[in-house]
Image: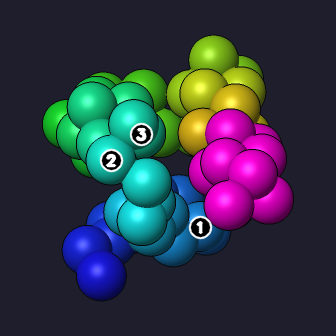
């Protein structure tokens, strides 16, 4: 499972293909936005969506 590090977090790729583009965006811009409130909110959204989609299965 692909992953990347940002600040003090490890972000894992979702098993759900619906989130693939979101993950790619987060990975691509992690070096530019890591540590900002904006980026932290995006990470929280991504992780919440991932959990919600897992529950739908």
Write down the residue under mark 1: 9
Q: Quadrant of residue 41?
A: top right
Q: Which one is nearer the viewer's eye here, 1 or 5? A: 1
> Residue 5, image x and y in percent?
40, 67
Which comes before the other along the chain, label 2 or label 1?
1
Label for residue 19?
A: 3
Q: Which one is nearer the viewer's eye here, 16 or 22? A: 16
Q: Label 3: few (<14), some or many (≥20) within 10 Å?
A: some
Residue pictured at 59% horizontal, 67% vertical: 9
- Magenta-colored span: 48-57
Element class at badge 3: helix
- The overriding secondary structure of the stretch rendered in magenta is helix
Asked if the residue under mark 3 is in contact with the one under mark 2, i.e. CB atoms within 8 Å, the reply is: yes
Write down the residue under mark 2: 17
Q: In the picture, which quadrant includes the C terminus?
A: bottom right
Is 41 displayed left or right of 26 in the figure?
A: right
Q: Label 1: few (<14), some or many (≥20) within 10 Å?
A: few
Q: Is residue 42 magenta?
A: no
User: Which residue is situated farthest in the front direction here?
Assistant: 57
Q: In the picture, which quadrant includes the N terminus?
A: bottom left
Q: Quadrant of residue 42?
A: top right
Q: Quadrant of residue 6?
A: bottom left
């Amino acid at each position: 499972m692909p992953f990347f590090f940002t600040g003090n977090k490890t972000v894992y790729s979702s098993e759900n293909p619906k989130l693939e583009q979101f993950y790619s965006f987060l990975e691509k811009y992690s070096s530019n936005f890591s540590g900002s409130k904006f980026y932290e909110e995006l990470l929280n959204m991504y992780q919440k969506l991932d959990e919600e989609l897992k529950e739908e299965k």
